[in-house]
């Protein structure tokens, strides 16, 4: 056997005692040599492997090597990964939460999107009325927007009138406004809960009924309005001006009077003429 008789992955190295022929030796695993090689030094690590010819190790995950030789494996682009022993740059796939062509630059999924598998596919949009942070890797990162309720990653329904869902809520359900208050649909804060007419209190807080002698004809945090002097009202939680005039010949100096007994007879030398309710 001549030197040229050794095939690829072999080299001519050993002289058989007593014979003129030499023998071909196979290169170590994951190494290769050109035909006609005469030394183990001609063995080189194949693509996907690195090291000296007698000790070729696979490129680690996240690295690759495209050519034969002892050169070091190259890193995949940031935010991408490859399996061990990768021999091409395109083996580097964008991680979950990132998108881009294989072997190229990877960009994070934008707000409101997610990607739960590696590779070049586009990021998916969150379901309607939900949102997610940048770089989201699972659909459950899509949480319902304020004013909507539902399981993370599922459909989100608007909060109805009288309920709200705040931005920082840890509940999947809309919260009820306090008694005697209300809110518009899709309200996103407890402060959207306004006291009903006939009740008064801070927005988002407890609402108390207007006392007898007062009324309130609008929603919100404004105070109840007093019946003026010369009037009274016994109704609690009045939603309109129900103040009644003292009868003719009587008068009350009290503001927010709550009973007809507050109307006293006019003193000698004075009089009143009204005797109808306002």
Image (spheres, rainbow, N blue to C red):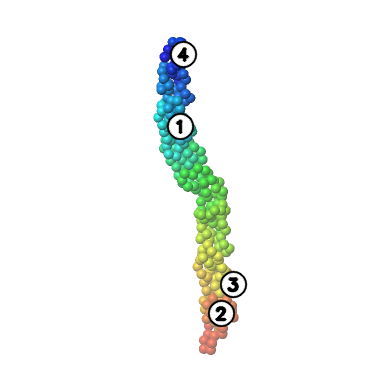
> Badge 4, how many Cα within 10 Å: few under 14, some, many 20+?
few
Q: Secondary structure at mark 1?
A: loop
Give the mark toward the camera: 2 or 3. Answer: 3
How many numbered marks, from 0 up?
Answer: 4
Tell me what residue is drawn at x 47 percent, y 25 percent: 30
Q: Of callouts 4 and 1, which one flags the residue occurring earlier in the amino acid sequence?
A: 4
Label 2 – label 4 distance at C-alpha = 135 Å
| Residue under numbered circle 1 | 59
Q: Disc 3 versus disc 4: distance between alpha carbons?
A: 121 Å
Q: Is residue 169 visible?
A: yes
Label 3's element?
loop
* Quadrant housing residue 22: top left
Q: Secondary structure at mark 4?
A: loop
* Other residues around mark 2 within 10 Å, as few (<14) / some (14–19) / many (≥20): many
Query: Which residue is rendered at x = 55% and y = 66% of the image?
Result: 207
Q: Earlier in the sequence, mark 3 or mark 4?
A: 4
Q: Residues within 10 Å of mark 1 (few under 14, many from 20)?
A: many
Residue drawn at (51%, 60%) of the image: 191
Instruction: Tell me: residue 227, above or below residue 80.
Output: below
Residue 146, how many percent across, how many down? 51, 53
Sequence order check, earlier mark of 2 and 3: 3
The CA distance from mark 2 to mark 1 is 98 Å
């Amino acid at each position: 056997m001549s030197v040229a008789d050794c095939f690829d992955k072999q080299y001519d190295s050993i002289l058989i005692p007593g014979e003129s022929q030499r023998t071909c030796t196979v290169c170590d695993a994951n190494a290769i040599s050109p035909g006609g090689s005469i030394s183990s030094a001609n063995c080189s690590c194949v693509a996907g492997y690195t090291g000296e010819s007698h000790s070729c190790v696979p490129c680690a995950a996240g690295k690759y090597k495209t050519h034969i030789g002892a050169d070091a494996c190259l890193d995949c682009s940031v935010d991408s990964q490859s399996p061990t022993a990768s021999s091409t740059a395109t083996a580097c796939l964008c991680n979950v939460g990132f998108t881009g062509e294989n072997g190229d630059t990877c960009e994070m999924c934008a707000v409101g999107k997610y990607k739960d598998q590696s590779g070049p596919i586009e990021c998916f949009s969150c379901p309607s009325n939900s949102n997610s942070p940048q770089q989201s890797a699972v659909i459950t990162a899509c949480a319902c927007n304020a004013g909507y309720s539902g399981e993370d990653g599922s459909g989100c329904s608007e909060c109805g009138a009288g309920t709200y869902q705040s931005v920082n809520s840890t509940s999947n359900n809309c919260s009820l406004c306090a008694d005697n208050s209300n809110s518009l649909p899709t309200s996103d804060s407890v402060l959207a809960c306004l006291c009903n007419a006939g009740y008064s209190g801070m927005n988002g807080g407890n609402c108390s009924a207007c006392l007898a002698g007062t009324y309130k004809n609008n929603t919100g945090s404004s105070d109840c309005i007093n019946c003026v002097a010369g009037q009274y009202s016994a109704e609690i939680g009045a939603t309109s001006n129900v103040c009644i005039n003292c009868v003719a010949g009587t008068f009350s100096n009290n503001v927010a009077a709550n009973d007809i007994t507050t109307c006293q007879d006019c003193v000698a030398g004075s009089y009143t003429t009204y005797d109808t309710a306002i």
